[in-house]
Amino acid sequence: MAPANPWIVHKFGGSSVADAECFGRVAAILESLPPGRLAVVLSACRGVTDALLRLVTLAEQRDEAYKAGIAELRTRHAAIAGSVLRPATAQRYLAAFDRDCHDLDGVLHTVKLTRFAGRNVVDLIAGYGEIWSTRLFTAFFGERARRPGEIRWIDARECVVVESGALGPAVQWTESQHRLEGLVSADFEGTLIVTGYIASDRRGVQTTLGRNGSDFSASIFGALLEAREIHIWTDVDGVLSADPRRVPGAQVIDSLSYSEAMELAYFGAKVIHPQTMAPAVGRNIPIWIRNTFAPENPGTLICARPVSNLPIKGITSIDHVALVNLEGAGMIGVPGTAHRLFGALREESISVILISQGSSEHSICCAIPEEQAERAAAVVRTAFRRELDENQIQDVQIDRELAILAVVGDGMAGTPGVSAKVFNSLGNAGVNVRAIAQGASERNISVVVQGREATRALRATHASFYLSPHTLSIGLIGPGTVGSVLLDQLASQSERLRREFKLDLRLRALLTSRHMALADQGMALGAWRQTLEGADRPADIARFAEHVHVDYLPHAVIIDCTASEAVARHYHEWLAAGIHVVTPNKKANSSDLPFYRALQEARRHAGTHYLYEATVGAGLPVIQTLRDLRETGDEVTSIEGIFSGTLAYLFNVYDGRTPFSEIVRDARQRGYTEPDPRDDLSGTDVARKLIILGREMGLPLELGNVAVESLVPQGLEAGSIDEFLARLPQFDDAMRARYEAARARGHVLRYVGRLNSAGQATVGVVELEQNHAFANIALTDNVVRFATSRYCDNPLIVQGPGAGPEVTAGGVFADLLRLSAYLGARL
């Protein structure tokens, strides 16, 4: 049966024939196809098979409600028939339907009397759905008469012969082929409408092909008709790279090999059951997975040799898994241990999903369905009772609430680094791997993880292979001067980052001193102000962090844009919990040395990232430059610089003519100082920056080790801001005298911080030559000079704007992107 005009098989699932509108859609798809011979396999209308099986259950319970259930099924099919058929045709269809209902009622009555339905009775009842849907569609498609050739209904029970076996229904190919040839001649030109799901055994007794049976029917008829290809029409665009309910960025896979499709299906992906593919695979028939509701989309091709550049095709998972672990020195070198273990499980019909064993033979573990864990533990302990009693095997451990993550792709074979990428992505997401399995084909890497971490593991691994965007769950504290500008910068670049680099910076939480806004799916960055204005939750920093660090997103980061020491004290717990921290807040890194060391230890232990470039020099690469120097073996002998944009501005502008107090007041109005200028004039901020740099050099500095010259006059340290500004002019003469003395010597005044490798640190006003690098800078520039073994005669200088919300926010943004790169984003 392989003429020049080959057959093409199309199978439509229950969702594709759910109602009258769906019937019309299926007909339109078939009518749009090029001329040729079609075999159209249909499932029952959506939900009908389940409804029929519920009738069996009701009858077994002697519940007369099964009669109402039959009536409901008739009403539903009558409604479809009335919508799509001419009245006379609908009447003939319903007459046949009523005969079926009469037979069905009789069978169910017998079930009610005996309180038992045998397998053959269940199969008989369950198969009515496909009979009803195909009869109805045959009549409908024939009335439309828009496709050339004869339209013929085929009852699969008359041609598909199967025998039940340990692996499910086994097709009797020779007999089935002979029967089909008796129904369809070799020269038939037209369309066959075929019942899916049902078949007969050798005795002629009706049976079914099990769940996904209609897919199996399509594959069987594809093989019997020697079809050119098979199209499975469903309600999705094709095979997806992951479950879209758990990985929103999942995408349609363009093509899969048969082996890849089988691996994905085994591990729970919504593809097509491996058994149902077998007839098509054996005859090398390509299978297309397509969407009835979007027929214009190309779908997914499953074939022997797909053309694809992706090494990984999909990432899927099996939930509700338990691990059985057998461990003991008595197992080493003893043949037959695995045979006894798996034999014991087989005897209890316990399914083994995954096996993992170390080469030492000291332990062997396997994954099983969680609901079978208790039985598995009992049967394995019984099988190894003697070894347990003699302590040759220490214990039989059962670990519950686990999940299996499977990474599938033919392209992994012979490609170095794929496994590393899988495990790096899981490690970066804070996901612990309990067991590992990989076959020699290298087509599948399977890992066992905690069930509650499965979604996070899926998303992290999926993103690591650029199958979906890298998602960072972001919480921002302090949407004020710097924080608000940062959010606006994120809003302006988020779409580009997603489009060009598949980076999803998802703002999920905002916290102020009084309120917080939380969003499960993320806030629109362009509308963060409106979101915050509508927030009515009281500030709760613990709840805030908990919301940011959800299990189903792979990476969480808190951005602290405050200057709060109270907030900085939470960094330790966040880092330890697996939350990354990005901040321009200097309080944590300049806090007491034990806290600083504990912070670094928490980061190292948890594998989290703590980025704080903007704590010194705003957006200037000061800390990174210092790290690069030290990590490449250079010895830093001293660092000096102007570390305050505010104080740089004050001394650049001050010329002795305008009072110093007036310049301070003007700088405050321009936004160059903190709301309270004393925070800048005290020099403490510069001292904190020296502490941060000193600790980056490995020096055990405390804030008290820094000699600080404060520009806040004695007696003005306390009191209100207005009182301070009102009294500051009283001290203008002292500053003017200092300026004039320096000018007389040809010098200028600058506020400089200095630090050397011996740990000596000073902050204060110094006189500098007019040609000094610090004497000729822009108004608010920071300038930092590194003297090192390499840069001794001509020190390395980093200079640029060191104050202002835009550059500080830019520095934080750069740290956020750096974090994204550390976590695997391709920037």
Image (cartoon, rainbow, N blue to C red):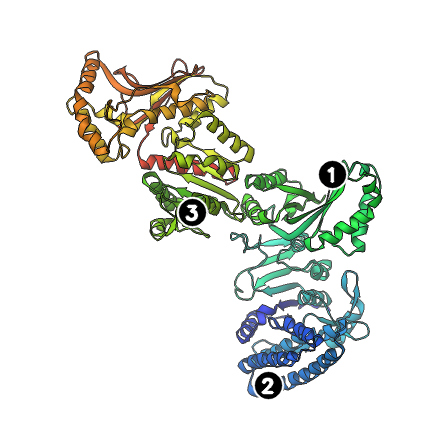
| Identity of the residue furthest to the top in this view | 745
Q: What mark, if any, has residue 31 been given in the picture?
A: none
| Label 2 or label 3, whichever comes before in sequence order | 2
Say if 298 sits above or below 88 in the image.
above
- The one nearer the camera, 294 or 729, is 729
Q: Which mark is in front, 2 or 3? A: 3
| Label 1 or label 3, whichever comes before in sequence order | 1
User: Label 1 is placed on what type of residue?
Assistant: Gly
Quadrant in the rendering for residue 775 = top left
* Proximity of marks 1 and 3: CB atoms separated by less than 8 Å: no
Q: Position of residue 19 (x, y in %)?
A: 55, 74
Alpha-carbon neighbours of circle 3 within 10 Å: few (<14), some, or many (≥20)?
Answer: many
Answer yes or no: is residue 188 visible: no
Say if 256 sits above or below 87 in the image.
above
Q: Which residue is mark 3?
A: 507
Q: Which residue is mark 1?
A: 358
User: Label 2 is placed on what type of residue?
Assistant: Thr
Q: What mark, if any, has residue 89 been given in the picture?
A: 2
Q: Which mark is in front, 1 or 2? A: 1
In the image: residue 271, left or right of residue 582 = right
User: Label 3 is placed on what type of residue?
Assistant: Leu
Q: Residue at point 70% right, 62% down?
A: 276
Q: Position of residue 692 (x, y in %)?
A: 41, 25
What is the spatial separation of the Cα atoms under label 1 and label 2, in whole angstroms? 67 Å
Say if 325 sits above or below 520 in the image.
above
| Identity of the residue furthest to the left in this view | 657
Answer yes or no: is residue 722 visible: yes
What is the spatial separation of the Cα atoms under label 1 and label 3, in whole angstroms? 43 Å
The image quadrant where one finds the N terminus is bottom right
Q: Residue at point 76% right, 35% down?
A: 360
